Image (cartoon, rainbow, N blue to C red):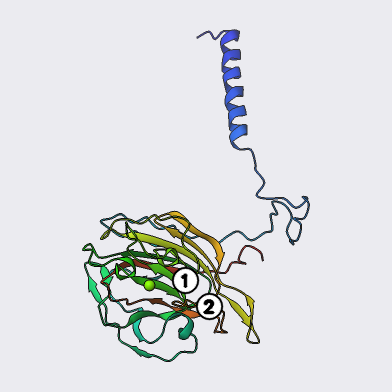
Amino acid sequence: MKISVSKISLVCAAGAIALSAWAQSAKQYPTGYSDTPLIPGQKYRVHDDSRPRPRVVTPGEFSTEAAPGKPPSDAIVLFDGSDLSEWQSWKGPLGFDFIGGKGEIGPPQWKVEDGAMVVVKGAPSLMSKRKFGDVQLHVEWASPQEVVAASQGRGNSGVLLMGAYEIQVLDSYDNKTYADGQAAAIYGQYPPLVNASRPPGHWQVYDIVFEAPRFQYGKLIKPAYATVFHNGVLMHHRREILGPMRHKLATEYEPQPAEGPLVLQMHTNPVRYRNIWVRPLDLTENER
Ligand code: MG
């Protein structure tokens, strides 16, 4: 067989193109740099190759009306629909009087029904066995489908961080009440930015970032802050909390331990909760 010169050059040209494409794909990208300027105020350079990479967390899945989602891999699950093993009952004061207050701890008395835990009228509030400081908290709740009262009498409960700082739970769907007492309010202090409530009986979601207050020698050195999303809509953006929750009274800080339990309030209405998880936060994790 006779191969023409032009055919050989064609094959060579095709080979050269393939080789250059391979060289392109094999281009080495540096994983970082060691000759860039320092980031002001930090010990690392811009794109520093020696800077620790973040921990890997497998993300969860979002809930639907029919089914709860899944928490991220590093979350502490406080309720997954099966039992109340992470909880105990708290018969005692909440909010301002919780700090240093006396109460009775016992077995949890709320019901677990269809994958939800349900407030039982007359039973004490529910308190987590674990204690937390700075956290990301995910809580889903549903007010009773049947509307039996108005204002604060309708689907009332509450999420109390450290037993003291309340993000209000209330059926605020077409239900007039005082602004700083409606759903997602920092109770008695700030109304939410907007009202994104779902109708009674539907599952609603709170995603909260809470920074615990800091005390030194009995004095407040940093107040608490809360960022709150209700059904994915921003309600509070790192809002400074003025002190523990109080009803019909202005508040101020009281020295307290660095960590405290999560409390879900019994306020007589049969509010349901599901898919509760917490991620304790180290907010300086990316500064070291
Ligand atoms: Mg409440």
Q: Residue at x 65, y 41 (%)?
A: 28
Cβ at disc 1 under 8 Å from ligand 1: no
Marks 2 & 1, CB-CB < 8 Å contact = yes
- Quadrant of the displayed image that contains ligand 1: bottom left
Q: Which residue is mark 1?
A: 188
Identify the disc placed on residue 251: 2
Q: Name the residue: 59% across, 23% down.
A: 17
**Alpha-carbon span between mark 2 and mark 1:** 9 Å
Residue 111 visible somewhere in the drawing: yes
Q: Specify the quadrant that holds the C terminus.
A: bottom right
Residue 89 in the image, given as x and y percentages of width and height? 33, 84
Q: Sequence order check: which comes first, mark 2 or mark 1?
A: 1
Element carrying mark 2:
loop
Query: Which amino acid type is marked by label 1?
Result: Gly
Q: Residue at x 45, y 76 (%)?
A: 248
Q: Amino acid at mark 2?
A: Thr
The foreground one among 14 and 170 is 170
Where 135 sits versus 31, above or below?
Answer: below
